[in-house]
Image (tube, coloured by chain):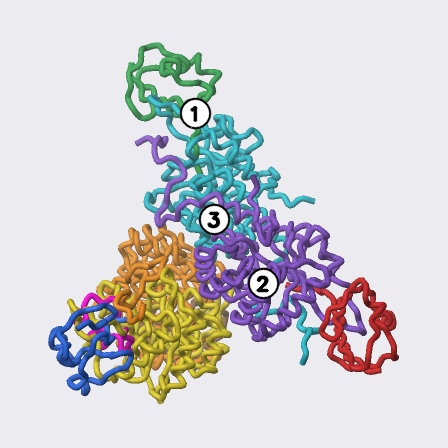
Chain colours: A brown, B green, C blue, D red, E orange, F yellow, G cyan, H purple
Amino acid sequence: MKLIINGKESEVSGGLTIAGLLEEKGLNPEIVIIEHNLELVKSESWPDIVLKENDRLEILSFVGGG
Amino acid sequence: MKLIINGKESEVSGGLTIAGLLEEKGLNPEIVIIEHNLELVKSESWPDIVLKENDRLEILSFVGGG
Amino acid sequence: MKLIINGKESEVSGGLTIAGLLEEKGLNPEIVIIEHNLELVKSESWPDIVLKENDRLEILSFVGGG
Amino acid sequence: MKLIINGKESEVSGGLTIAGLLEEKGLNPEIVIIEHNLELVKSESWPDIVLKENDRLEILSFVGGG
Amino acid sequence: MADMLTIGGVELESRLFLGTGKFSSNRMIPRVVESSGARVVTVALRRVDLDFPEENIVNFVPGECILMPNTSGARNAAEAVRIARLARASGCGNWVKIEVISDNRYLLPDNYETIKATEELAADGFVVLPYMSPDLMVAKKLEEVGAAAVMPLGAPIGSNRGLKTKELVRILIEEISLPIIVDAGIGRPSEAAEAMEMGAAAVLVNTAIATAADPVAMARAFGLAVAAGREAFLAGPGAVQDLARASSPLTGFLRDD
Amino acid sequence: MADMLTIGGVELESRLFLGTGKFSSNRMIPRVVESSGARVVTVALRRVDLDFPEENIVNFVPGECILMPNTSGARNAAEAVRIARLARASGCGNWVKIEVISDNRYLLPDNYETIKATEELAADGFVVLPYMSPDLMVAKKLEEVGAAAVMPLGAPIGSNRGLKTKELVRILIEEISLPIIVDAGIGRPSEAAEAMEMGAAAVLVNTAIATAADPVAMARAFGLAVAAGREAFLAGPGAVQDLARASSPLTGFLRDD
Amino acid sequence: MADMLTIGGVELESRLFLGTGKFSSNRMIPRVVESSGARVVTVALRRVDLDFPEENIVNFVPGECILMPNTSGARNAAEAVRIARLARASGCGNWVKIEVISDNRYLLPDNYETIKATEELAADGFVVLPYMSPDLMVAKKLEEVGAAAVMPLGAPIGSNRGLKTKELVRILIEEISLPIIVDAGIGRPSEAAEAMEMGAAAVLVNTAIATAADPVAMARAFGLAVAAGREAFLAGPGAVQDLARASSPLTGFLRDD
Amino acid sequence: MADMLTIGGVELESRLFLGTGKFSSNRMIPRVVESSGARVVTVALRRVDLDFPEENIVNFVPGECILMPNTSGARNAAEAVRIARLARASGCGNWVKIEVISDNRYLLPDNYETIKATEELAADGFVVLPYMSPDLMVAKKLEEVGAAAVMPLGAPIGSNRGLKTKELVRILIEEISLPIIVDAGIGRPSEAAEAMEMGAAAVLVNTAIATAADPVAMARAFGLAVAAGREAFLAGPGAVQDLARASSPLTGFLRDD
């Protein structure tokens, strides 16, 4: 299934939840901020939200900045 | 007859033309710019335009400026 | 007897010691530095030094300075 | 014969005059200033002064400077 | 009674705000924050590089600090607002530094878009600190639309060039009732002290500290300088004179004539 | 290992030297000294006014301080030497600030007479700190004849005009191995910090503190600024750039295009 | 081939623009214009005082000059546009200096309203020279909407404070393809020369000339200085060095050792 | 009645003195002198390289100019005196620029030796213009011993750094009755103009012209700038203000309210 993650197309197995995707990508859930189809999603709901074809996902994090 | 000249009310005799007004006020026509009811009026037409009650007249001139 | 104190002539009773002079002038010995005829005199010797006619005495003190 | 020219020893044929030396060195007399044994020598006298062993000669010129 | 800076209802003792960009390692951040004494710390929001995920800077910022995400990357008000809302929703508080830039050479801010973003976010309950090009009329508009402070640049971001906009900043301080915080360009503690002596409410420093040979020591230096400049502002400096004025008395000289 | 300034064999932690002239009351001195952190304090020697004898300033200077009498009033080397010897003989130590001035309008020092006095007093065992007009050749001579430090002026005494001789002081710092102490003219803590950032060993301040509305607070401000400037000098400031250098990353922007 | 400045299709030899305010007498204007060499002269439009009508300044401006009425008095774009149209209709040409100000203390321009007025008047065929607060994004917008040049302030109008906005003006010159004309604040010919050396296309001066003890001589001084600065810019100044570089040869010294 | 500078009994119209070092070719000198307008030109005396004798610079200096040989290479008064006498004896007049330098890094002058050389040569009938490090007491001594003018440095020779010693030069101008000529360091025409506005009698420029991409044009620029600065000094500049002062009238606005 095709998603747009951080602006780039990428293929992932169907029926994944956000939590599942993070696990598959090996990302530490503690450190990321998720925007799903332009909606911010709180971490509580990551296990419940199932991703669909063409969903737009932004996986963000805080970095050093001035 | 009442006119608004340069933002101030002033009484002038009725039936005056712009040219007449300037003469009455002792103003040198060479040096002024006239706006009549928000329309600029070229000097050629000053003798022809008869002022009416409550007309707004701006009598302007260039001064030193930076 | 005439002395030159701090550059000015002044009359004092004869036979005065430096210590006596300070007492007569009501100066606190703790706070002054004495130069007698261009020689610095330590306070220990003030009671012993008898002033003579025309002696030059500098009575100095520290003040605020930059 | 040995001279000290501009601080350096150099060998020249004996009996040379200053004028002769300049000619031998191919120097344009117009552009140089000559100090002979710490005395400035005017160009008029260059043909007459015969150089001696160990004479100190400074051959100078004006250059650009600030 | 201590001299505190109050912004967004928070009382701040330190008037040095700290940026966290460009440090050789995030591990240095806690010590830099501590030696600087800063309690307001900026961070940026970025997409995670899925191939090389970095550590989250937030974990390196001491808990007592106020996090102030900036909207760097935003080229207009809409992008700035989106970034600000994501940052707040992530739970790091409601402070935001507005930074709207489309000039990539000098990174100079777009004052118009900055006003728009400030208005929208202030109305939405943010504590908004806009980074701006010093301009009195713009500062007045930012005040009208609810900014919590105004942050004029001293020189281009990261240039270490110093307080080059002194003349305009001086006027903002005089004419605007909001705290004026000099942001960007300050390269030396002496320049931070000078901004404070002029009456700036605070300064925000990042590059000057991050690019020092010893960032922890430089952070301490800036903390001291900002405190010095503030203290001097409050102490009321003496007048400047054309001629000399003796500091030792001009009478009672020991002289033989 | 602390960064100490060693002069005349004494290790000094504070690099702010304090002048005691022009204070509204001597009673203020102890608090000014304390808040400044200074440990080297200048005083002047004067004839007692027999009609109105003043308190001796020395009684107001905390005991742990080094007293540095100046030779103010001296118009030539001989007068300076006489004053220095009287001051030392009075038991207040062997430090002296040479000040030889015959210009009454700008109080600019006479470098020649200053060299002479320095030579004579250094040979006589004094720790000599000459106040001078910044001049590399003169500083080299002062070094040759035994000065313990060189104290160029930043601007005329008491003018609060700041570090106006930066270009020449910069060269002294680079070319002279003695401590360079900026004396006179510094009017703001930011200027003291700048002198220290340039590599000055210390600064001597009097008028800027004495003429402040709140001298005790201003003394604290100068103490902080001098420490800040020194710390910055040691920390190695980053480079100054013509263009901007982003302080937030230039990649990973959250954008829809 | 002469170095001409082309604005609105007109080729100008002199890069000094002259303001006519504040002169003690209009009778002085012709001599001031002549000694300055200026060919672009600003004037203002005002209501005639019916009780004390003044002479029209235009009669004192040499015929070969381009008259550039300013919109002083305008507090927004609409008022500026009205003034500009009246001025043009009166037959004094189609150049206009946009000046939109609502700050009465520092007379700083309103950049937003200035952009609006510039857009409307440029579309209407005016040669528009907007006076503005130096801001790169604003200058870019002014360029987009058809300004003939951009006129950033050097310091507040009439302050004679000099080129205080150097850092921002430097960036405008580098980034904007329109002529950059420094307007307001320049108080000395040396400051005008410096602006030109930086690459400014011209400078507009009024107060510095009008408030001089001898305005005619000061006008000449500014004319010379502007020409000097332009010539220097074209001549390509040499590099600035930290160390000395001997100007006389370092060899061939006449020495006995 | 023209404003002339009189030195050594000679009336000079141009207040720009020109150095001839560092030009890519002597052939350029006549055009540089002509475009600069200078009438006082410095040269140096050197040993001829017997293997590669150069052309004599004097042949390239227009006949109407006053030649002012400098004593570069001299490390003390005696060497300076010897060079001066040789130069004079060679028939190029009796003007001399004293230059005594033993610092090879910053080429800063030795004021003491300079005073000695000045005294000896002035007594011997030379018109002596000493190059010096700005110091009021030294300038007073130079005046006493017969200098025709005093030439303080603005910055190290050849550095193009500008008028860095402004504060001290300002005082020399105020306190010394001889002409003060700023020599060395001036890098831009604007800096030369500023020196003249301060009241300097003249400026001596070499490196800034010789190192320009187009020396002939830069020479013209300096000539104009020096004239501008002098004219401004005579014209009496207006006061500098903290606030704005409108240059257009503040009454009679065309407004509908």
Which chain letter goes with mark 1?
A: G
Q: Quadrant of the C terminus of chain A?
A: bottom left
Identify the disc placed on residue H86: none
Q: Residues within 10 Å of mark 1 (few under 14, many from 20)?
A: some
Q: What segment carries the magenta color?
A: F21-44
Q: Are discs 2 and 3 located on one and the same chain?
A: no
Q: Are discs 1 and 3 located on one and the same chain?
A: yes
Give the residue number, with chain letter if any, for mark 1.
Answer: G55
Name which quarter of the figure residue D64 lies in: bottom right
Q: Position of residue D58 (x, y in %)?
A: 75, 73
> Which residue corresponds to the image point at 28% horizontal and 65% vertical from the top-left?
E250
Residue type marked 1: Glu
> Which residue corresponds to the image point at 66% horizontal and 54% vertical from the top-left?
H66
Tell me if residue H58 comes above or below residue G210 in the rendering.
Answer: below
- Is residue F27 one of those drawn in magenta? yes
Residue D34 is left or right of residue H44, and the answer is right
Tell me if residue H225 comes above or below residue G38 in the rendering.
Answer: below
Q: Position of residue G186 (x, y in %)?
A: 46, 48
Residue type marked 3: Arg
Callout 3: helix, strand or loop? Answer: loop
Give the residue number, with chain letter if any, for mark 2.
Answer: H123
Identify the disc placed on residue G188: 3
Which chain letter goes with mark 2?
A: H
How far apart, in angstroms, are the residues tagged by discs 2 and 3?
41 Å
| Circle nearer the viewer, 1 or 2 | 2
In the depicted view, which residue is nearer to us: G87 or E237?
E237
Callout 1: helix, strand or loop? Answer: loop
How far apart, in angstroms, are the residues tagged by discs 1 and 3?
30 Å
Q: Position of residue G132 (x, y in %)?
A: 44, 47
Residue type marked 2: Ala
